[in-house]
Amino acid sequence: MIVLGISAYYHDAAAALLVDGVIAAAAHEERFTRKKHDSSFPIHAVEFCLDYGGLTLSKLDCVIFYDKPILKFERLLETYYACAPKGFRSFLQAIPVWIKEKLFLRKLIRDELTPLAQIDAFDMDNLKLLFSEHHLSHAASAFFPSPFDEAAILTIDGVGEWATASISHGKGSNITMLKEMKFPHSLGLLYSAFTYYLGFKVNSGEYKLMGLAPYGRHGSLDVKRYMDIIYGNIIELKEDGSVWLNQDYFRYATDLTMVDDLKWEGLFGFPRRLPEGELKQCHCDLALAIQQITEDAVIKMGKTARTLTGSKNLAMAGGVALNCVANTKLALAGVFDNIWVQPAAGDAGGALGAAYAAYYMYGEGQRTAHGTVDIADDAMQGTYLGPEFSAIDIGKTARKYNAPYAYFNDFDSVAEITADLLSRGNVIGWFQGKMEWGPRSLGNRSIIGDARDTEMQKRLNLKIKFRESFRPFAPSVLFEDMPDYFTTTTASPYMLFIADVVRERTNPRPDNYNRLSIKEKLYHVRSDLPAITHLDYSARIQSVHRKTNPRYHKLISKFKEKTGYGVIVNTSFNVRGEPIVCTPEDAYRCFMRTEMDYLVMENFIFDKKDQRPWHEERDWKEEFGLD
């Protein structure tokens, strides 16, 4: 059975192709259009999936969309009716779009796919088009590719149709939905509201809020006061993990903004931080307060999932499942023996989940039993599911830009040279094999550097990524070497869990630490891996496995041979506001626009010093908005 899953029209459009239950290809539309979080119909991603599979539309058994628009429309109408006359401006903006387009999504999808049908004169009336519920798509994306034969499933996001969180039980080829939390009460929307109030972009900057939280003062009276304010006015957190949100303080249900700014200013004592505004200690303390509340809620939801299912395994998805700190706190709470998180946990992953739901729950496919649990032995193929490019493709890009390069016949030489360049403090664009699926670069579309370098974090943020200096970077570490650096031995191939740097590698804080400014705290050297050690001595780990990414594993192994360290810095290959690079041309352009020193694409090495001067008619930074 061949199934194409699609997500679109809200944010993070994507397509995924399943062939007899195996992921053949998957990609985000943003990587092709170069528009971050592109929500438009993923025609380029669909074309890639079909082309990679050697398929046309006529070969598909079905196409499935990741949610049910009629239920979402019902939620909008009921919400506007219940809140009237509030929300009239939002109503006037939203409803015409629904009546014109989204309410007739079946026709819209067929129309979008029609150009592809002309390839083999396929009659679109014969296309079997299915619709999955939003949180079922998330649940299916979490369970079916996981290494578990049976598991509790927890999905948490902003909102789907009505559900904002769900608990279900996966067993074999079936998922049974057990419990849902309903709109307007939502842990995801609560976190997004604080993302907005602290000056970051909703549905994009939530990970910045998580990264800002460690700058808050743990155990301080201010953090406790903010938590008391939130619990006393905004949220009621129940024992099962469900939340009740006081809608007097929110505007997302009826307006075009998240919260009532003046009421929040009255509560917290400072106004909403504007984008790019100065970061103050109050912002950091509030970020820590809401992060801790989110962690408490996730742990309570996890305990409820364990009680309802009796399972020792947990699979997670939904946007909140990208909060790696909350995931780790749940793991450390000992509620489950094993936790696996879908690497594309947000809406893009819904395309894959919908395809899985169609294959197993509609088409009656049968899963193969795993037996013993190995967290790294899942069906995601390391997330390397996107486009790949040949030496011919890279050569074309080099010729287009008259770009000098060195080419090597064997990869061992490439790894040896790159490792040496890293050890000497160079920043390198690393472009290999298939593009990653999900929001993280995992060693195929990455910018890499030496984690031992005390200037590396500052340089990467300000000179390469052009982003806020407080934002941390992740380590890529050889899986077999993890205990040498971090307080965990559990595989973390997708950067979805954190661990502390082992104590013997850390440096104590100075006596006046709590009186230091945010910038002074940032540049205190916390360990012998300063570029990846966050303020609280944690790191968001990517364990690198020889089986799933032999080239990246070999590079880090060569680096270890030279330096004694089996760990490097890894950040996504893009600049702020830009999607991760997809093609060789995307990579070369990003390389030339930044202060990267070298670009390594497959067996090609480009030295910045040898390249021609880079000129563009307009400031390229205007091309990408704030993320």
Image (spheres, rainbow, N blue to C red):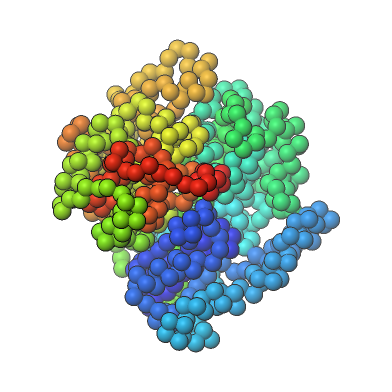
Count of number-bearing discs: 0
Q: Position of residue 278 (x, y in %)?
A: 60, 29
Query: In the picture provided, is 525 more to the left or to the right than 619?
Result: left
Residue drawn at the location 20% of the way across and 31% of the way down:
563
Query: In the picture provided, is 394 more to the left or to the right than 193?
Result: left
Residue drawn at the location 37% of the way across and 54% of the way down:
585
**Residue 58 visible in the picture:** yes
Q: Position of residue 583 (x, y in %)?
A: 37, 57
Please identify the residue farthest to the right as the structure is shown. Answer: 85
Q: Position of residue 446 (x, y in %)?
A: 35, 46
Please identify the residue farthest to the top as the structure is shown. Answer: 511
Residue drawn at the location 75% of the way across and 56% of the way down:
90
Q: Nearer the viewer, residue 167 or 495?
A: 495
| Image quarter hosting the C terminus | top right
- The part of the image, by quadrant, that contains residue 558 is top left
Question: 582 above or below 508?
Answer: below
Q: Position of residue 257 (x, y in %)?
A: 70, 48
**Residue 376 visible in the picture:** no
| Image quarter hosting the N terminus | bottom left
Question: 105 above or below 89?
Answer: below
Query: In the picture provided, is 595 more to the left or to the right than 193?
Result: left
Residue drawn at the location 54% of the way across and 67% of the way down:
41
Q: Nearer the viewer, residue 44 or 15?
A: 44
Question: 518 above or below 50?
Answer: above
Q: Nearer the viewer, residue 397 or 3?
A: 397
Query: In the picture provided, is 61 more to the left or to the right than 388?
Result: right
